[in-house]
Image (spheres, coloured by chain):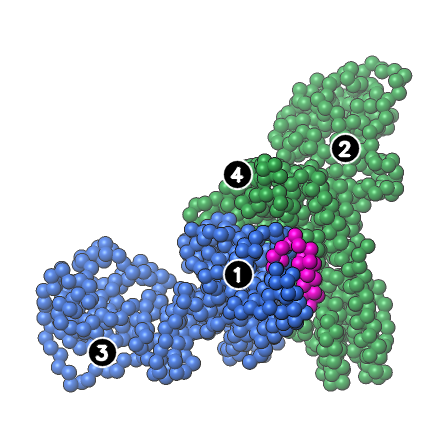
Chain colours: A green, B blue
Amino acid sequence: MRYSELLLPTLKETPTEAEVISHRLLLRAGFIRKLSSGIYTYLPLGLAAIRKVEQIVREEMNRAGAQELLMPMVQPADLWKESGRWEKYGPELLRFTDRHDRESCLGPTHEEVITDLVRKEIHSYRDLPVNLYQIQTKFRDEIRPRFGLMRGREFIMKDGYSFDASEKGAEITYQKMYDAYQRIFKRCGLSFRAVEADTGTIGGSFSHEFMVLADTGEDTLVICKNCSYAANMEKAAVQQPEKPREDVELLPMRKVETPGKKKVDVVCDFLGITPDKLVKTMIYLADGEPVAVLVRGDHEVQPVKLKNMLGAVDVELADDKKIYDITGVPSGYLGPVGLEIPVAADQEVAVMVNFTIGANEKNFHLQNANLPRDFKVIQVADLRQVTAEDRCPSCGGLLELTKGIEVGHIFKLGDSYSKALNASYQDSNSEEQNFVMGCYGIGVSRTVAAAIEQNHDEHGIIFPLPLAPMQVIILNLDPNNEEISTAAESFYSRLQEKGLEVLLDDRDERPGIKFKDADLIGIPYRITLGKRFLQQGEVEIRTRVDGKTQSLSPDAAMAEVVSAIQDGMAATRAEE
Amino acid sequence: MRYSELLLPTLKETPTEAEVISHRLLLRAGFIRKLSSGIYTYLPLGLAAIRKVEQIVREEMNRAGAQELLMPMVQPADLWKESGRWEKYGPELLRFTDRHDRESCLGPTHEEVITDLVRKEIHSYRDLPVNLYQIQTKFRDEIRPRFGLMRGREFIMKDGYSFDASEKGAEITYQKMYDAYQRIFKRCGLSFRAVEADTGTIGGSFSHEFMVLADTGEDTLVICKNCSYAANMEKAAVQQPEKPREDVELLPMRKVETPGKKKVDVVCDFLGITPDKLVKTMIYLADGEPVAVLVRGDHEVQPVKLKNMLGAVDVELADDKKIYDITGVPSGYLGPVGLEIPVAADQEVAVMVNFTIGANEKNFHLQNANLPRDFKVIQVADLRQVTAEDRCPSCGGLLELTKGIEVGHIFKLGDSYSKALNASYQDSNSEEQNFVMGCYGIGVSRTVAAAIEQNHDEHGIIFPLPLAPMQVIILNLDPNNEEISTAAESFYSRLQEKGLEVLLDDRDERPGIKFKDADLIGIPYRITLGKRFLQQGEVEIRTRVDGKTQSLSPDAAMAEVVSAIQDGMAATRAEE
């Protein structure tokens, strides 16, 4: 491609609308443009990067025995009513009626459609397993789309669905997809980690998320430094606490005045105790119903764990006004004693003795509270977030907390959808059995954004070679000089003949602009032809990732770039 | 691919819902399945055929200097209001509001979005021309979707848009696209014709349609047997008629009784005249307003010509009740004399003398009517359909009428959109000028259907080699026989090593079923391994298009199939 003919509108200024680095760089590099909230046009080089991800995904899905098809984006409401999700799915499901007043929606995901297809077309265990996927534009009407391609409303996704005859078969298929995902993100040239994940509203019995590691990630990963344990913070289990010593004397509960002391630290300071001797009472609304959750003063509630314990669709923290409406107590003095709503306790609260709680009265706390002597709870469970001080729930090793961006998610769904949609096959005894399903997503456009979050510097994007929209950029620093231009054109055609993807910057612009743009758009290899070529017959080659430069003769430069790119691509393709 | 692992649910029965051959065969071959009215899932081999079209389109668009990008499917209403099409576009534009009550629509086409992008990103004549395209799923809420992929609601389209600095530049770009389209459909292996076309509601100054020739086509093409003239029936011009001889005497008009005689033939028989001496009065509603149109008794009104003459968005023929409501005259006796609505006349009526018309009174006609002596018309124009008896408007040669399916459409749009959206660039004098635009569509999924309409027999599809989802099918007639299976597997891997796309029918099914399915799905080359292989060491190769079979040794068969496919692909790629 010739830069002079390419729609690549780079920006000098950082767009004010962009909050995260990938969004800023995608806009500045001229890769995307916003059409409306959360909805972007992919310009030529942005699309080229997306296509790189698509092609890797396609090849590895096919290699793993999955078949590509393409389902519609507009889906009839009937199927969603059959699965029960027409009611359950929130306003992210964009619903509308067509000209004949038929209720429809824009597909955010395709469990219903694929299950409908398979129940109609596959009837015998002999035709199982089957694993189907598509790469498609999806729509989710996010309430607050942001971060460019990280959380848009319209985005490109690979979604795959498997149908097996048995739990065991489904687990084999799940493992195949797990392995395929490992290969996919390795081939993308990304540093990533698969973690155990919550199964969320999509349901299912177990799941893994594939996380691109990046300091700017929204998700926190809990990784054991000793064993292979890794989990999303939402899912990461806390070790079972040790039982309290039996010989600790339970002291009588007493009310103490704590005037104006509301926050944990302040109360503890005032009472001369450490936060692990205090229990916080948090009020949540679970599908609208209030519930109190007790955690130790130095711990935080993990809402997803709470949601799963309650079997709720949605939980949210109550605000101060809501807390007062529900309990009649101002926030900061809440406690479980005498509270008239259900109370759940984190497992670590259940092993505490003689702890401090709010007195349900302004300016007062209770000390030496004890369970179950002073109050009762409906359930005790692991309800808190893991901290860096916790130990691995699997091996007891030290934990590391790190940030990541979710780019893939695989679920073992079981038979929830096949039961709801009455999707079954005949087993070898001619008996009808529900399919055992799995589903497997990859955020294709999001992977490009995550790659940028992970790989950039102050000058711009540093594309991993397999995702780069172009592999080499040739800078012709003086398009008006015939000698330089002839040599640049020769590089351009010779590199293309070698099968490389080449961008020739043939614009009539100052060298400084060309250097800046080349850094900004993040092409892995740069070949520069300027004064040194005229004077010494040498060209400069520079690697974007480490800024290393070499001055070489044209032939040596050709050979160097070609072999570097071929080796680089081969390295990501190699099987482990 | 192995048939045993492929989702390819062929059907023995012809689905009752399918009215046209491509729809029937796409369903029977297991290439598509309906999700809801006009909305289909593309199963693996159906998608593979679509991808073949996409890839040819992509390569030829890139070769012609166009750049691929991808615009959103969900579009904001604002842009459509700016262009004026929010009002003008009918209910085919699916409109909805999102969760924040913002009006949006599903993109049936992208003139607004691309013009908005270009007006923001391109500011100078130095950056022109620019030609941008995308391959995308589109949605049009057709009132009566039918014919499978021929007229669906959701479909895959390539839409391209060009921006030039001048009319002349736009014409050069238009010609490049015309040439690219010629290459595209040639490379698809289709018999097709480019015809002059009406520019329709999309606007613009001239346009061509690319028609796949097929007896089942909905469109009629008017093709000159002598020169290069070819036009869609809607557009095809009628030669200017000769003026009447000056010495013909205008006879006095007289009223005659024609009891119960209403139809042209019946009236003419009764009066002893030929239909070319009678003038029919047709009532149309142009955007709801009545207008009478006069054509000779042996001619038919061409509504698109009428619409264009009137500058109307929509014209429709009035039914008998409407005619009576408007004129007070029963259908069959209408005439222009004394009619109180506007009357337009086809150019051939204007050169008639002493003709017969309805008397606007039941059971009566008027003879020897003459223009302008007896009545007046608002306009005279070419308003009728061409017939096979007409002569070429360009050279006077003989015409041929044939049927076709529109698969591509190119328009020179001019500045209608750039003016409406205030999209301009600075010319070399630093003056703002509106872009001169063109737009270029290809129905990608429709092309697959059109290919089938053109290429099939009573046994199934006969794919042109470049569009075939697989190039060769190997029939293993006895998967339980080790010798046959080993040889079949060897063919399968050797052909794939040669870069061919191979389907191996390894199913445990009867030979009859395998032969039938192979014919149905239309794979160009078939290699059969059965009894003859065991007995004589020979395999059969068969060409789907002509049914020719040869028995050859395995090595000879390999060589034959490989060279046939390589030659066949090369032939469609060759430049003219």
Can you say whether B509 is above or below B432 in the image? Answer: above
Label number found at residue B519 = 1
Tell me residue A411's x, y (percent).
Answer: 69, 42
Q: Amino acid at mark 4?
A: Lys
Locate the C terminus of chain A and report the quarter of the image it occupies. bottom right
- Look at the image and tell me whether residue A427 can be seen: yes
For marks 2 and 4, give the one nearer the viewer. 4
Instruction: Classify 10 Å Cα crowding around label 1: few (below 14), some (14-19), many (20 and above).
Output: many
Tell me residue A351's x, y (percent).
Answer: 82, 23
Residue at the image point whose x is 38% and y is 79% from the top: B224
Instruction: Classify 10 Å Cα crowding around label 4: few (below 14), some (14-19), many (20 and above).
Output: some
**Do residues under tags 1 and 2 come within 8 Å of each other at their CB atoms?**
no
Tell me residue B157's x, y (percent).
Answer: 53, 62
| Residue B501 picture quarter | bottom right
Disc 2 secondary structure class? loop
**Do residues under tags 1 and 3 come within 8 Å of each other at their CB atoms?**
no
Can you say whether B361 is above or below A368 in the image? Answer: below
Label number found at residue B351 = 3
For marks 1 and 2, give the one nearer the viewer. 1
Disc 4 secondary structure class? helix
Task: Determine which residue is flagged by label 2.
Answer: A384
**Do residues under tags 3 and 2 come within 8 Å of each other at their CB atoms?**
no
Instruction: Classify 10 Å Cα crowding around label 3: few (below 14), some (14-19), many (20 and above).
Output: some
**Same chain? Circles 1 and 4:** no
Task: Determine which residue is flagged by label 4.
Answer: A81
Sequence-wise, the earlier of marks 2 and 4 is 4
Magenta includes B494? yes
For marks 1 and 3, give the one nearer the viewer. 1
Magenta segment, prevailing SS (helix, strand or loop): helix
Locate the N terminus of chain A and report the quarter of the image it occupies. bottom right
Parent chain of label 4? A
